[in-house]
């Protein structure tokens, strides 16, 4: 039976709240371990009880899970380790309870194939003296359980794009309750969410995380995705990070990544920005390779994107690979926006390759 097309009766939140309101022992903390599964796009989670509130990841024990059920191990050697790396407040269980972002490690303590954080940490440590900042714009689409965009006519289409971007009204802003619940939950959790808005396609939204320095950008974006999925779950709605969920004359979904170093933010930093763009141009194909699956369906040169096979940059140009904001062009310092990453990208992989290209001057091997 396909759960997407079947009728699943809603659970009673009033009944649930009776139990959530029960007092919790002072010496017991619920810790929800969150990790990226074998797809490299989805998150999994499970919860255990700790005997005291953790102050740092070092206070939290490693755990494990069945990797054969997440596409990360064989059944004959299935245990995958969970290494706690970042702590957030739990907006669902409240109190001292925590959400724990984790890295995944194989039986031999080597990173799993989808653990992009381990490499990212190395890169961020190497460039710490350049103070890399990231602001990540996560776009996503709300779907009904049947997979059709939330609020769209069943089997049909709404009016063409135009009134939906930053729209207000019952027929323009589809799913705002989820968006606002997510915003508050991120603030409570400790995610540095800096804003949100309705996007160009109806039922598509965006929020921004940052500015965050170094590895914090990836940690916070992954936790924000978990929060979004959990909140939408309570509303009986799906979240899609598909970069082109609906073919045709509809905008896709990206994960635009704003980036700067201290040199870019200082007076006349435009020179450092131009130099960074030159480096990014040389490694365009390599970057595209880690910027998300199915991105070729989005990066067509239409709908505010550049063509996936071409690299260009420009001031205030949303059809460019790299956009320099107009204010940055006027101030001659600030940041650049990499518009190429897809909505389903791994922010660890994206921020990792950006600093390796721009700050560590890594280059691709010369082909024979």
Image (cartoon, rainbow, N blue to C red):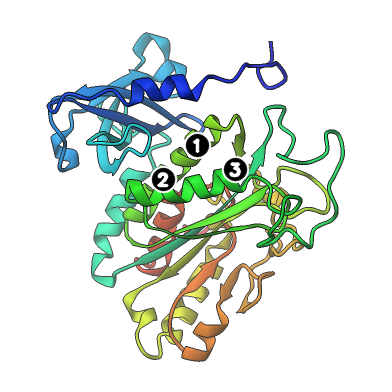
Whether the residues at callouts 3 and 1 have beta carbons within 8 Å, the answer is no
Q: Nearer the viewer, residue 261 or 96?
A: 96
Residue at 52%, 90% in the rendered image: 330
Residue 234 rendering spot, x and y as whole percentages: 52, 30
Mark 1 Cα-neighbour bin, 10 Å: few <14, some 14–19, many ≥20: many
Q: Nearer the viewer, residue 214 or 200?
A: 200
Query: Secondary structure beneath disc 2?
Result: helix
Mark 2 Cα-neighbour bin, 10 Å: few <14, some 14–19, many ≥20: many
Residue at 32%, 30% in the rendered image: 33
Please state if 240 lies on the left or on the right of 290 as rendered. right
Name above or below for residue 175 compared with residue 213.
above
Name above or below for residue 340 compared with residue 153.
below
Whether the residues at callouts 2 and 1 have beta carbons within 8 Å, the answer is yes
Name above or below for residue 352 compared with residue 54.
below
Q: Which residue is mark 2?
A: 185
Q: Quadrant of the N terminus?
A: top right
Among numbered discs 3 and 1, the one appearing first in the sequence: 1
Residue 292 rendering spot, x and y as whole percentages: 57, 47
Residue 353 rendering spot, x and y as whole percentages: 43, 57
Residue 244 seen in this snapshot: yes
| Mark 2 → mark 1, Cα distance in angstroms | 9 Å
Q: Which residue is mark 3?
A: 241
Query: Secondary structure beneath disc 3?
Result: loop
Please state if 224 lies on the left or on the right of 212 as rendered. right
| Mark 2 → mark 3, Cα distance in angstroms | 19 Å
Q: Nearer the viewer, mark 3 or mark 1?
A: 1
Instruction: Point out which mark residue 231 bears.
Output: 1
| Mark 3 → mark 1, Cα distance in angstroms | 15 Å
């Amino acid at each position: 039976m396909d759960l997407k097309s079947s009728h699943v009766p809603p659970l009673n939140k009033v009944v649930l709240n009776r139990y959530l309101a029960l007092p919790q022992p002072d010496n017991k903390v619920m810790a929800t371990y969150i990790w990226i599964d074998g797809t490299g796009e989805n998150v999994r989670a499970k919860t255990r009880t700790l005997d005291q509130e953790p102050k740092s990841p070092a206070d939290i024990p490693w755990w494990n899970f069945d990797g054969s059920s997440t596409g990360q191990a064989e059944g004959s050697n299935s245990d995958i380790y969970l290494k706690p790396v970042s702590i957030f407040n739990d907006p669902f269980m409240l109190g001292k309870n925590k959400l724990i972002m984790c890295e995944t490690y194989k039986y031999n303590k080597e990173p799993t194939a989808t653990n992009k954080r381990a490499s990212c940490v190395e890169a961020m440590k190497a460039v710490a003296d350049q103070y890399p900042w990231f602001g990540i714009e996560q776009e996503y689409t709300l779907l009904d359980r049947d997979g059709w965009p939330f609020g769209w006519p069943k089997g049909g289409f709404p009016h063409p794009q135009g009134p939906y971007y930053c729209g207000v009204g019952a027929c323009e802003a589809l799913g705002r309750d989820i968006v606002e619940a997510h915003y508050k939950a991120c603030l409570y959790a400790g995610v540095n969410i800096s804003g949100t808005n309705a996007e160009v396609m109806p039922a598509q939204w965006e929020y921004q995380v940052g500015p965050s320095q170094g590895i914090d950008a990836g940690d916070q974006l992954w936790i924000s995705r978990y929060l979004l999925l959990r909140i939408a779950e309570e509303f009986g709605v799906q979240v899609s990070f598909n970069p082109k969920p609906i073919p045709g004359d509809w905008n896709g979904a990206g994960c635009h990544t704003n980036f700067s170093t201290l040199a870019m933010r200082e007076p006349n930093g435009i020179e450092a920005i131009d130099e960074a763009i030159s480096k990014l141009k040389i490694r365009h194909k390599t970057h595209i390779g880690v910027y998300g699956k199915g991105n070729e369906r989005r990066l067509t040169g239409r709908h505010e994107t550049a063509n996936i096979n071409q690299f260009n940059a420009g001031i205030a140009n949303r059809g460019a690979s790299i956009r320099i904001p107009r204010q940055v062009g006027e101030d001659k310092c600030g940041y650049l926006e990499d518009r190429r990453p897809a909505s389903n990208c791994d922010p660890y992989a994206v921020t990792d390759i950006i600093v390796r290209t721009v700050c560590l001057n890594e280059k691709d091997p010369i082909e024979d």
